[in-house]
Structures are given as C-alpha cells and as structure tokens.
C-alpha cells in the first residue's frame, strides 16, 4: 500500500469531523485559555485519535518514563511501582459491547500488547473492527503478538493502522529507558512483517530517546513505513523518572540537554523536508507550527 493511499483511508473525512470535547482532560484536549470555547489544542494521544480504548492495569514493559505509571502510582496512588509490572486485564472492559466511534480509535494508550494481554487485545480489537471502526494499534511490538494480530485481523486490514514505538537504535538506550520492552531488532521485524503483509504501518519516535541520531533512525525504518513517522519530545522527563532516579542519572542529563528549544530546532532542521515525518505537539509548540484544534486528525 502506498503512502498516499494509506493517508487517504486514515484521514478523518469532512463529513465525520469529530466534535472536540470542551472539558480539560488527561486525554490531551486542553483549553488554551480559561473561558474560551474555541481555542483548544489537541495534544498527546488526541493528536492521533478521538478515543482511546484501554482494558489493562499495569504494563510489563516497565518504561521508566511512563506517563500512565506516573499517574497510577505517583499521582493517584492506585498501585505501587512493583505492581505496575504485573498486568491485570480488566475483564469487564473486555466483555463490553463496542460501537462505531467517529474518528480514529487508539488501542491501547495506557498499557501495551503483551503475551499476557494478547487474548484480551484480540477480543477487543475484533469487536471494534466488526463495529466498523478505524483503529490505530499502538505498541512497542513483540513478534509473537503482532504475528497473531496480523493473522486474526487480516480481514479488517483496511481499517487498521499499526503504529510501533521505536525511538532509539542502541540496545544500551533501550535497557535504560524501556528495560523489559522488545529490542530494536524485534520491533523492526514487527514493522517489516506488518508492512510486507499489506497492513498500513507507521512509527512513533515519541519519545525520541536518541535525538542526536534522528535521521539515521528515520532512514533505517523508512523502507517499512507506508503512512508516517512521528517525532516527539520526552515530556516531563525529570518528574516522571524521579521515582527511580531522585538524584538524576547521566542518561537523563544527556537526554534533557536535547529537550531544549535549540536542540528541538536542530532535529527539525535535519527532518523538516522529509515527507514521511510529522512532529508532535511538543515540537510544534517550540517551532511555531500549526497545532491542530480538532482531535484525531493524525497530521
Ligand atoms: S509500553 Fe507504554 S504503557 Fe507500557 S510501561 Fe512503556 S510507556 Fe508505559
């Protein structure tokens, strides 16, 4: 499938432009100014989707910067950091009937697709697809899980866009930031497999964990991407890693140096003319690029 065709299928049609939610939420749609009804911006997962669907607590990938972990453990004290790695499927959510939702639906956003959750993931995805939804499947992908999904979801290929998170090249980087998540090689193999089986594919390099190698990262993944590659900062880097490194760490210091406006512009300069690359809100804000005010446009 070529990039133009993939983009067409996954662009929200004018007839279906979703109504933007007006309340301030954890989901990424925020008011720009108090009292303003129109000036809102779609950030976070809302840049990609009108709705997120989740049905697990915890995630065995144990990324040290995880926003979902930060909210569940540090902010709302719903579980301990140790418990975060023990995934619990919320069966009630899995059993729910699924309806047609206007716009692109993201699955999942606060956990991942792992051997422990794959039965539930497959069940929920089939219900969403049978209801006619366009589904964005986001994961730090494991080969056995993606193989299974490519097989069982094959009849719904045109409703699916895979987005695999790959923000690094070095194994050392993965071990520090995303200790239990798959290696670069495994993620690349998943991307390649999905692409060669004719699924629409994209990559999220958010967070971009090796900004100094951004072009190399993009060029290595390019042959297996039909849709887009997103670049984004690691937001709230210190706040979300303090639980493990209260006094900091050289890896954290190094990445923080690359979150400055000047470094963001450096990365942008190397990729700005690449038609495959899109920049998340964290970059758009710094660069003065147009920020979408409607959720789920994925542009
Ligand atoms: S894969 Fe996502 S949900 Fe899981 S620990 Fe990492 S950032 Fe959190």
Image: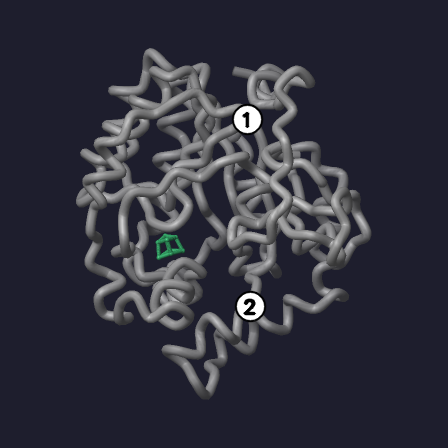
Residue projecting furthest to the top:
155
**CA separation, marks 2 and 1?**
28 Å
Mark 1, other Cα within 10 Å: few <14 / some 14–19 / many ≥20: many
The quadrant in which residue 120 appears is: top left
Q: Nearer the viewer, residue 108 or 223?
A: 108
Mark 2, other Cα within 10 Å: few <14 / some 14–19 / many ≥20: few
Q: Is residue 166 visible?
A: yes
Q: Name the quadrant where ligand 1 sits.
A: bottom left
Which residue does the image show at 64% across and 66% down from the upper left? 259
The residue at which mark 2 appears reads as: 236
Mark 2, secondary structure of its residue: loop
Q: Nearer the viewer, residue 287 or 271?
A: 287
**In which quadrant of the rendered image does the C terminus lie?**
top right
Task: Report whether 200 appears left or right of 111.
Answer: right
The number of discs equals: 2
Which comes before the other along the chain, label 2 or label 1? 1
The answer to whether mark 2 is within 8 Å of ligand 1 is: no
Where in the figure is residue 231, as x and y percent of width and height? 60, 48
Task: Report whether 234 appears left or right of 15.
Answer: left
Task: Report whether 61 appears left or right of 290.
Answer: left
Which residue does the image show at 22% across and 31% down from the upper left? 95
Tag nearer the camera, 2 or 1: 1
Q: Is residue 224 visible?
A: no
Compared with residue 218, is residue 247 higher up or lower down, i.e. above or below?
below
Where in the figure is residue 159, as x and y percent of width and height? 45, 18
Which residue does the image show at 66% across and 15% down from the upper left? 15
Where in the figure is residue 242, as x and y percent of width and height? 44, 78
Which residue does the image show at 44% across and 73% down from the upper left? 241
Kindly identify which numbered label has been placed on residue 103. Answer: 1
């Amino acid at each position: 499938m070529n990039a133009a065709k993939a983009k067409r299928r996954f662009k929200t049609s004018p007839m279906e432009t979703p109504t933007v939610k007006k309340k301030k939420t954890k989901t990424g749609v925020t008011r720009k100014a108090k009292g303003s009804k129109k000036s809102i911006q779609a950030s976070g997962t809302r840049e990609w989707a009108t709705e997120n669907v989740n049905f697990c607590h915890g995630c065995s990938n144990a990324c040290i910067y995880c926003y979902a972990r930060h909210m569940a453990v540090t902010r709302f004290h719903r579980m301990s950091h140790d418990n975060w790695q023990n995934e619990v499927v919320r069966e009630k959510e899995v059993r729910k009937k699924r309806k047609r939702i206007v716009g692109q639906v993201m699955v999942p956003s606060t956990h991942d697709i792992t051997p422990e959750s794959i039965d539930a993931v497959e069940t929920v995805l089939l219900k969403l697809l049978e209801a006619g939804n366009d589904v964005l499947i986001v994961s730090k992908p494991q080969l056995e899980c993606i193989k299974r999904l490519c097989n069982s979801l094959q009849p719904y290929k045109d409703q699916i866009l895979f987005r695999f998170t790959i923000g690094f090249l070095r194994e050392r980087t993965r071990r520090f930031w995303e200790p239990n998540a798959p290696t670069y090689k495994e993620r690349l193999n998943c991307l390649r497999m999905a692409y060669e089986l004719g699924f629409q594919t994209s990559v999220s390099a958010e967070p971009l964990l090796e900004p100094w190698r951004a072009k190399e990262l993009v060029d290595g993944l390019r042959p297996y991407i039909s849709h887009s590659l997103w670049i984004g900062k690691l937001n709230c880097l210190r706040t979300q890693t303090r639980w493990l490194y209260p006094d900091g760490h050289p890896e954290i210091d190094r990445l923080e140096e690359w979150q400055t406006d000047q470094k963001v512009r450096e990365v942008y300069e190397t990729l700005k003319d690449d038609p495959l690359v899109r920049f998340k809100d964290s970059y758009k804000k710094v660069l003065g690029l147009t920020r979408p005010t409607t959720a789920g446009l994925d542009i």
